Amino acid sequence: MSMVIGTNIASLTAQRHLASSRLDMETSMERLASGSRINSAMDDAAGLAIAGRMTAQVQGLDQAVNNANDGISLVQAAEGGLEQTTDILLRMRELAVQSSSGTYSSDDRSNINTEFTALKAEITRISDQTKFNGASVLNATTSVNFQVGSAANDQISLTFKDMDAVAIGSTSQTVNDTAALGAFGTDATSAVHTFAGVIVAGKTATFSINGNTYSQDFLDVGADAALKSQGTLNALGVKIAAGEGGVSAATANAAGVVFTLTVTAGNQAGQAKIVTGGGVNSDVLTTVAASLTAITSIDAALKEVSDYRGELGAVGNRLTHTVENLMTRSENTSSAKSRIQDTDFAIESANLAKAQVLQQAGTAMLAQANQTGQAVLSLLK
């Protein structure tokens, strides 16, 4: 091999290996310091992309767990209200059985009916006031979707049922007045319903739109019949506006016969009615015959409440299993992501030790290579 001083091949070789071991050492230090095997796309471009997708999936699954738990809480709120409704119906049935006996006078039945009427009002109050995060869960017929997965279409649906005293029970309903609907086109922003007369005691205002039906019992509040009818329709309007996105307001005039809805252009107009009957709300205990009818109606109401509680329980149990499944999926996905992205400290600490030894050895060899040119001087003596 020729002896030259212009190009020190041994030194260049030592520098190349020294740079490589230094890069390995710096990479190991970075991984040990960050705890992540992939700190840039240069480390593992495919792994970085896969880990990113898994991170999004895990975060979505973790939020879905929260969503499902919120759904369980909603179901529990609704079922808790129905538990009280069941207790009230059982007491109402007890009163109806008591009133149907011939040993009681009309005055006795009147006293019994007073409690019966109060209990009917409490069923409706529970239905109206049982809410979760501001949303009514016992006086609506809309559906709610629980997002229980990271994918857009991974949902569980629950359809609410109206559980007020008007809606539950098997008493037949009689339509007394169907409001005449004014002209309503796709460009209209209001819908006007005109009744033939005012709403009076014993009657109920209803409104059906988009497959949903809203009901409001007669409110005995106001100086005269017209204002009482107006107050009843205004209370119905509050329910409609709360439950329908296409209806921003619904109010009655001072005469209590014109019901006007402010709607989104092109929204369905709906149908307003004044009815009697329908549910245990129409039952009274003033006579033996009426008391016997009430027993049948309350039995039907108990079945409806029990059926709805069963549906809520089924959805609640389903959501419970959903939470367990989501947590398992999140755990397994996190484990898979960890194998791709996280630093294996046993391996990297060994790699670091190796790179440090090579750095020390490479530095020593570079020093030796840089001294080889000194041998040429002996030839020049």
Image (cartoon, grey):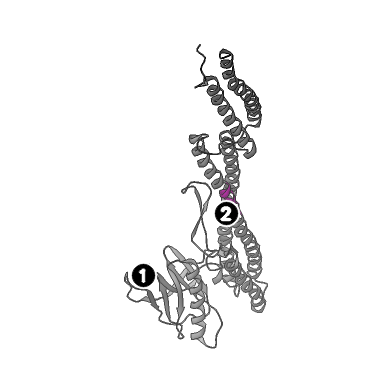
Image position of 271 (left or right of 79): left
User: Does residue 78 appear left or right of residue 44 in this picture?
Assistant: right
At 61% from the left and 60% from the top, the residue drawn is 82
Of 9 and 333, nearer the camera is: 9
| Residue range of the region highlighted in magenta in the rendering | 62-72
- Whole-percent x and y of residue 55? 54, 43
Tag 2: amino acid: Leu
Does the magenta stretch mainly form a helix, a strand or a loop? Answer: helix
Eye-nearest disc, 2 or 1: 1
Numbered disc 2: secondary structure: helix
Image point 57% across, 43% down: which residue? 326
Outermost residue on the bottom side: it is 223
The numbered dot on residue 265 is 1
Give the left or right position of residue 99, taking residue 192 as reference: right
* Disc on the earlier residue, 2 or 1: 1
Label number found at residue 76: none
Q: Is residue 64 magenta?
A: yes
The amino acid beneath tag 1 is Ala
